[in-house]
Image: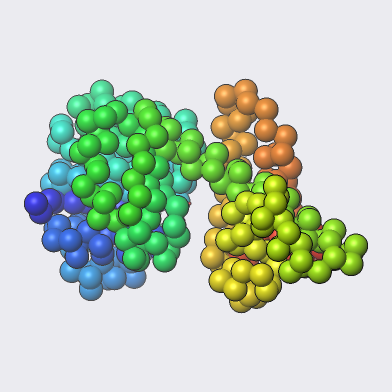
């Protein structure tokens, strides 16, 4: 069934996600600060909304894909924002990667107004957004999840209901904290192996079938050779940029300090990615941290 969808934040991710909703037969009105992004939505068959207020007043479903928590709080909560204008029963989907506290605050106000909201951050990157194969990690009440699901299924392949509000964001930052730490661990092992005269392919062959096995090693190996599809084989072009990893590690640290969790390795990973980004690594794939650790970057 075709729905009237409002889509705010038509950037690298939001643009192709909105285009997939159009392709599935929905009527999509977009809003963005960028003229170019709005033009791309029109070219894909969508329309442009005159304002956030107009978009919110006429949509049955609203999707947001914005840079950070401050943008999300503003566009939902400010006077004239989404929550001022959306009709009761509207389904709200925030797919931005943001802090857990902002996700919970916005959803609580939405629920008070009779709106159904989920936080639904994604993994899968720009390629997954274009192909409609994203993974959505979804936080929100059952009714909100069931309302959002048909639209998430258009934009993604794997849709997981993680629990109540904020747990989608929690899943995203916990997963990426594992990833950041494990990538540093694998990279350190390859650097040490080089110094010890152990061939990289040999370390890969042994560790990929031994207890050091993990995704950072076997699917995304940070040195060229063992995994031909990994960014190490194309001069570390992203992939998943180091600055995005840093953003997620910082969100994990904020969440750890506000919830009182002890995450010493997460803190160290954030500090290392911060140093790497400040020394010119921000636009490179996050696996290029191996060059930084080796001292060649
Ligand atoms: P982007 O910068 O390409 O897009 C953000 C868009 O939001 C831009 O078009 C910008 O003009 C628009 N915008 C900003 N403030 C606005 C406002 N007040 N009103 C309307 N539009 C506004 O970013 P992106 O790469 O598309 O990422 C979006 C979100 O998805 C981020 O939270 C990011 O962490 C997350 N994410 C990105 C990737 C990725 O690979 N790019 C992967 C997973 C998750």
Picture coordinates of residue 278, whole percent (x, y): 71, 58
107 over 44 or under it: above or below: above
Could you tell me which residue is drawn at 48 percent across and 35 percent down? 170
Where is the C terminus found, in terms of image quarters? bottom right
* Residue 172 located left or right of residue 155: right
Colour basis: rainbow
Q: Residue furthest right?
A: 196
Locate ligand 1 by image quadrant: bottom left
* Residue 216 located left or right of residue 38: right
Would residue 213 be visible to someone looking at this image? Answer: yes
User: How many numbered markers are drawn?
Assistant: 0
| Observer-nearest of 202 and 2 | 202
Question: Would you identify the image quadrant in which residue 144 lies?
Answer: top left
Picture coordinates of residue 158, whole percent (x, y): 35, 50
Q: Residue furthest left?
A: 1
Question: Would you identify the image quadrant in which residue 253 lies?
Answer: top right
Could you tell me which residue is drawn at 54 percent across and 43 percent down? 175
Could you tell me which residue is drawn at 67 percent across and 40 percent down? 266
Could you tell me which residue is drawn at 20 percent across and 38 percent down? 147
Picture coordinates of residue 165, whole percent (x, y): 37, 30
Would residue 120 be visible to someone looking at this image? Answer: no
Picture coordinates of residue 101, whole percent (x, y): 47, 30
116 over 15 or under it: above or below: above
């Amino acid at each position: 069934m075709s729905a009237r969808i409002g889509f705010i934040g038509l950037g690298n991710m939001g643009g192709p996600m909105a285009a997939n909703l159009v392709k599935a037969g929905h009527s999509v009105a977009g809003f963005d600060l960028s003229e170019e992004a709005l033009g791309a939505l029109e070219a894909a068959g969508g329309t442009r909304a005159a304002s956030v207020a107009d978009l919110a007043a006429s949509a049955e479903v609203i999707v947001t894909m914005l840079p950070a928590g401050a943008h999300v709080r503003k566009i939902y909560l400010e006077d004239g924002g989404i929550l001022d204008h959306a009709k009761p029963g509207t389904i709200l989907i925030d797919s931005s990667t943001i802090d857990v506290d902002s996700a919970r605050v916005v959803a609580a106000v939405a629920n008070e107004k009779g709106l159904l909201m989920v936080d639904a951050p994604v993994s899968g990157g720009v390629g997954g957004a274009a192909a409609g194969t994203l993974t959505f990690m979804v936080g929100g009440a059952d009714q909100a999840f069931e309302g959002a699901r048909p639209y998430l299924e258009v934009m993604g392949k794997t849709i997981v209901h993680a629990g109540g509000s904020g747990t989608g964001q929690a899943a995203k930052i916990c997963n990426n904290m594992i990833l950041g730490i494990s990538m540093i661990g694998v990279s350190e092992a390859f650097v040490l192996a080089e110094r010890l005269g152990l061939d990289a392919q040999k370390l890969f062959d042994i560790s990929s079938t031994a207890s050091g096995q993990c995704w950072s090693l076997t699917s995304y190996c940070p040195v060229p050779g063992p995994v031909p599809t990994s960014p190490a084989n194309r001069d570390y072009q992203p992939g998943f940029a180091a600055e995005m990893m840093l953003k997620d590690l910082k969100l994990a640290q904020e969440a750890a300090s506000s919830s009182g969790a002890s995450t010493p390795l997460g803190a160290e990973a954030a500090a290392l990615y911060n140093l790497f980004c400040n020394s010119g690594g921000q636009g490179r794939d996050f696996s290029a941290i191996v060059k930084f650790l080796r001292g060649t970057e």
